[in-house]
Image (cartoon, rainbow, N blue to C red):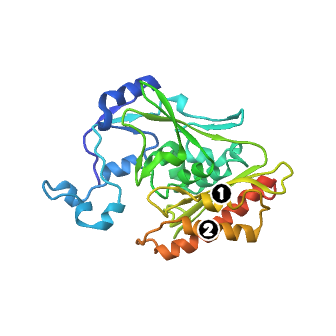
Amino acid sequence: MRILHPFRYERPKSLDEALAILEKHGAKAAPLAGGTDLIVNMKHRSMLQLVPGAGTAQAQWKSAARVPAMERPEVVVSLSSLAELRGIRKGDGKLRVGPLVAMAELSRSRDLLPEAGALSDAAGIMGSPLVRNRATVGGNLMNARPAADTAIAILALGARLELASRAQRRWEDASAFFTGPGRTVRKPEELLVAVEMPIGPCEGSAYVRMGVRRQLEIAIVSAAAWIRLSRDRSTIADARIALGAVGPTPILAPHAAGMLAGKAGGPERFAEAARTARGEARPIDDFRGSAAYRLDLVEALVTRALEKALARARGEGAP
């Protein structure tokens, strides 16, 4: 049985109180939302990390760098009482999602379709039903893994993320938010307080992934696509394509997406864009798949994501 290390537990009643705690303790504090990542990482131990002077597992074995490092926060700050960080609101051309919204709620929300269907898809495929009832979109984003399902979705959706501290509030584009595996632009005294996406008519998006299993699996490759059609729905006015698990962070494929603007969607056009997306991916070999296999998957998954996004933009078929 893995035992948690001693730590101080705080449960602030307001956002201001939570931010004051983070300001006081800085990097020694860890925000707790659903806990499906944080608690696991706090329990993660390797013998080398526990033996004084032995160094870290990462220093001994390259493969250990792919395992989340053991986290030992001195203060755990529960966000469970912060109602202002919950809820899904749609209006004025924007979709605003609170970081404490659980994956299960996201996957069931009709407010996300068809424009932000990619986020619904990503939430509905993450983990297991039990995990989805606890895991939050904010936690998944702050975990910042290259294969984080909702991270790839919000990247395709052109999202912005609002960070708050006691001193200020600021917005960061999703395209600049992730800086490396497990790393973001968030400062220790800040909290993610909202995820906001622009939405409009004639839009559709979708997220797909490939793993060894359907659930409780990290994607070998994932892809999300967003499409906005012209008013008569005859051509693609704009598009975005995002890829997961093929780089150190979730990445956009701007050249592939740029090929679609002003063109009619269809199998040949999407296959051409998927081949271009393949050239924008930078996968590695690891125990879950080779780089060559991942490149083949990029082509297949980008095509599927585009086809599903187009159908949603047209209002065709099942959501």
Task: Please indicate, yes or no, whether residue 135 appears anywhere in the rendered image.
Answer: no
Q: Nearer the viewer, mark 2 or mark 1?
A: 2
The quarter of the image holding the C terminus is bottom right
Determine contact: label 2, label 1, CB under 8 Å.
no
In the image, what residue type sits under mark 2?
Thr
- Residue 140, above or below 66: above
Residue 296 left/right relative to 116: left
Q: Which residue is mark 1?
A: 225
Residue 264: numbered disc: none
In the image, what residue type sits under mark 1?
Ala
- Residue 93, above or below 224: above
The residue located at (20%, 60%) in the rendering is 48
Q: Position of residue 313 (x, y in %)?
A: 77, 53
Residue 276: numbered disc: 2
Distance Cα–Cα, label 2 vs label 1 = 14 Å
Of label 2 and label 1, which has the lower sequence position? 1
Q: Position of residue 37 (x, y in %)?
A: 42, 49
SS at circle 2: helix
Residue 192 left/right relative to 42: right
* Residue 284, picture quadrant: bottom left
The quarter of the image holding the N terminus is bottom left
- Residue at the far right: name it: 232
Please rate how many residues cluster around mark 1, counting C-alpha atoms within 10 Å: few if below 14, some from 14 to 19, many from 20: many
The residue located at (23%, 62%) in the rendering is 59
